[in-house]
Image (cartoon, rainbow, N blue to C red):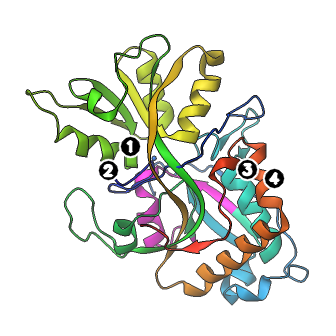
Amino acid sequence: MTASSTRRTTAAHTRTAAVGAIAVAGALILTGCGDQTKDSDSGSSTSSSTAPLADKLPQSIRDKGVIKVGSDIAYAPVEFKDSSGKTVGIDPDVAAAMGKQLGVTFDFQNGTFDTLITGLRSKRYDIAMSAMTDTKDRQEGIDSDTGKKVGEGVDFVDYFTAGVSIYTKKGDDQAIKTWSDLCGKKLVVQRGTVSEDLAKSESKKCTGGKTIALQSFDNDQQAQTRLRAGGADAGSSDFPVAAYAVKTSGGGNDFQLVGEQVEAAPYGIAVAKDQTQLRDALKAALDAVIKSGEYEKILKKWGADAGAIKAAVINGAK
């Protein structure tokens, strides 16, 4: 995560949002091929014969009736497992609404975040939808740490906006107010996220021999567990996720947000560069869901309506 990225960054990317006052209120229920658990969930869909935008999809996907979605399903409230084991959250709900427009089911398949794009390239998935920040590096297949091309880039259909936040144990903020205050501190993050990229970038700016002691984990829940146990001074993740953890972990007694969220950027649905028809069909479906008002209802359900967009955008990273 560089100073211009957020949660889900395969190599420094931003999954953040001005999800403003995501009041993560009681209504809230709540950054691969990675740990390919056999975990998968399907959203609802409509018969292609009645779906208004079905003819926009590639025939191969229409024939299957399924869009395989790579997702790190451990990032509440964007996508996570509820108490019954069902995949729920912002992304599954938006995908299900799009499925009604396209006449297909979006089948969410669990994988570690930092390998979702690799899974997309290998055709394990048709798309990746996982609070992934749309960045220029990801579009071009660039490793943000080295600046070198590591593979084929992807296109994004942007559907949300979010930013990165810092959180600490409740009542113990370690005098942390900004990212520069993390110098000499231990920080936990999810591997491959904008938070990780930003921490690496900020650590290079530290002086006096102090750097940020970064601990990266496969998923955000593992990072939270380490902080909760006292193994770190602070954690960082996308604002909606950090706010949700603050609201729900330990009944609201485990964590607190510190400072302001930074690096507001769009979340995008990642699609292989050679799948332009699928990309454009997704954009059309998302625009239809936004226009119908269902999109706004979904975000309000999860307390994330401050991150809403007015229209779908292809490759909107700044």
The span shown in magenta is 107-126
Res 299 label:
3
| 22 is higher (above) or lower (below) than 9 | above
For the C terminus, the quadrant is bottom left
Amino acid type, mark 2: Ala
Alpha-carbon span between mark 2 and mark 1: 9 Å
Label 1: few (<14), some or many (≥20) within 10 Å? many
Res 182 label:
none
* Residue 121 drawn in magenta: yes
Q: Of marks 1 and 3, which one's residue comes earlier in the chain?
A: 1
Q: Which residue is the site of mark 2? A: 3
Res 297 label:
4
Where is residue 169? Give x, y as percent.
46, 16
Where is residue 98? Give x, y as percent.
75, 68
Farthest right residue in view: 50
Nearer to me, 10 or 27 = 27
Alpha-carbon span between mark 3 and mark 4: 6 Å
Residue at horizontal 47%, vertical 58%?
133
Find out whether the residues at labels 3 and 4 contact each other: C-beta distance under 8 Å.
yes
Res 195 label:
1
Amino acid type, mark 3: Leu
Amino acid type, mark 1: Ser
Where is residue 229? Give x, y as percent.
43, 15
Q: Of marks 3 and 2, which one's residue comes earlier in the chain?
A: 2
